[in-house]
Image: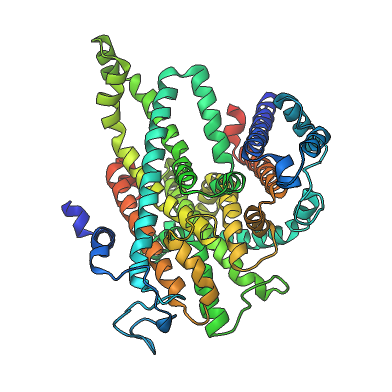
Amino acid sequence: MKRFLSNPVLALAGLVLIVIAFMVLFGPLISQDPSKQNLMSRLQGPVWTEGGSWDHWLGTDRLGRDMGARLIVAMRMSIGVALIGTFIGAVAGTIIGFIAGHFEGLVDDVLMSIVDIQLSLPFILIALTLLAFFGNSLTLFIVLMGLYGWETYARLTRGLVMATKRQTYARAIVALGASPARLYLRHVLPNIASALIVQVTLTVPGIILLESSLSFLGMGIQTPLTSLGQILGDGREYLTTAWWISVFPGLIIFLMTLSISLIGDGLRDRLDPTLRARDA
Amino acid sequence: MSPTFILTKILRMALTLLAVVTFTFIALRLSYDPAQAMLGPDATQREMEQFRAKWHLDKSLIQQYVIYVRNLATGDFGISFRDGRPALDVIFERVPHTLQLGFVAYVFAILIGVPAGILAALKRGSLFDRLIMVFSVVGFALPNFFFGILMILVFSMMLQWLPSAGSSSWQHFIMPAAALSLTLAGILARFTRSSMLETLSKQYMRTAEAKGVSKMRRTVAHALPNAAIPVVTILGLMLGQLVAGTVVVETVFAWPGVGRLLISSVSGKDLAVVQALVLFIAFAMVLANFIVDMSYRLLDPRSRSKS
């Protein structure tokens, strides 16, 4: 922790995430009503621009809704979807990895072929196809976010399980009569947890970017719900008159993905001693 | 490279494509009733049956699947219901635009990413090295659509230097290509750097130094060719990134390519075109990966003798 704080970049990234978490958790208590329209103050600029006021210090959108309040609602959605998606993908992928690593042989071949096939296509293509065929709904959208990245967890876990179960300590535990489930959950999982956590720091920004890309394109979160990408996409029509509608959500997405990636890099350097020596 | 190795690779390629075909078939059949969708809600029972008979929808799923695969194999990807032409024709007229943009972006990314990575590794720990690493992280974290919009704001609206939409002149290429190549250049710089660092720490580099080989010659003749090998694989993996980026960036800059076609077909529910596009892109990517895999093996004598 001390070393973590001594790196100013990491400390700043951590601070950004703490501020964002605070806004997501407590923002609605202090912000205005995000759905209150006021057509008298449409497309009003932020406080420091001409025509801006402290009533809406981040400006208003095309219906005169407060941008600050809207951004908080959108952040809750974007982050919520990203966390649920990461959770589904990580749990499913890890279990599939355990299964492939435990049984090996045919089961492993079939599962790893599925992994290869998913890796051979850009995920946004798979997502767009499913959205085209099945129509957009929040449920399908969250399932899609869960499908993102499971294959990397599966691969990672499979490799680590195969390597670990051949080690003497694992064989000793089995010889003492432990069931495979006990071996994996009590002994293997704690050993591979750090690698999985580093993977999470890669998946979360990936899903945030995927969700905001799809919502930006009008294929993701639909009104009346809102997300950062969706506000950004809506703001495209008002770039000449109201740049803030697109720029603020974009900045928040950028800050979030940047901070998580930086912390992920820091964690990886710490957890992987070979990297530390070679790439300090 | 033994013939059996190439054969396994080709078999694997075919298997992947078959999986994608099966995926689109299942998705198409599960998602809607074509008879209902084409004829509308007022269609009589008789009309529906005639339609189903005409398009083999009255047969078993297995038979339908065989017919579907056979049609694809003969180049019949269905009819776009928005403009009544074969889906493949609709796609092919868009392909050149996407290839042009993708090519420019790819070259941009290589010209920026590779030299930046090499220099960063040679000057490890310097300010330049740090800047390159910052650039690489920013390149990953900055969403390409947001970068595109920022460029439109600055260069099209404030400075009025560059056009924000269309593809008719070389000026039109600058912003979309920059938006597409930013992430790629970042990945490439980072990867080239670590590959170069690893090569520089090898024993043979120390041997060369001890023999009195000049630094220039050590770098160019010993380090670069060895560091290049893993970079080539990343170039292949980057194709997927490029395709994904195209979908978004073409929409931002109203570029008349395949990516924008995909988005408009998805929102217009033009399923024949969506399906044909997915198969087309999958085929292109699988083929590209195969070529990269082969050239990787040709480049690296070690993997040649092993396989």
Where in the figure is residue B178, as x and y percent of width and height? Answer: 57, 67
Q: Is residue A186 above or below residue B126?
A: above
Where in the figure is residue A192, as x and y percent of width and height? Answer: 31, 33
Q: Nearer the viewer, residue B179 or A137?
A: A137
Judged from this view, the residue extending furthest toward the left is A2
**Which residue is at a point 25% across and 10% down the rendered structure image?**
A177
Judged from this view, the residue extending furthest toward the bottom is A50
Count of numbered marks = 0
Q: Is residue A201 left or right of residue B300?
A: left
Q: Is residue A218 above or below residue A163?
A: below
**Which residue is at a point 41% across and 67% down the rendered structure image?**
A249
Q: Is residue B155 left or right of residue A83?
A: right
Where in the figure is residue A136, as x and y percent of width and height? Answer: 54, 50
**Image coloring type:** rainbow
Where in the figure is residue B183, as x and y percent of width and height? Answer: 50, 59
Q: Nearer the viewer, residue B205 or B258?
A: B258
Q: Is residue A151 left or right of residue B260?
A: left
Q: Is residue B270 above or below residue A247?
A: above
Quarter of the rendering containing residue B122:
bottom left
Whether residue A32 can be seen here: yes
Quarter of the rendering containing residue B14:
top right
**Which residue is at a point 38% across and 86% down the rendered structure image?**
A49
Q: Nearer the viewer, residue A148 or B122?
A: A148
Whether residue A44 can be seen here: no
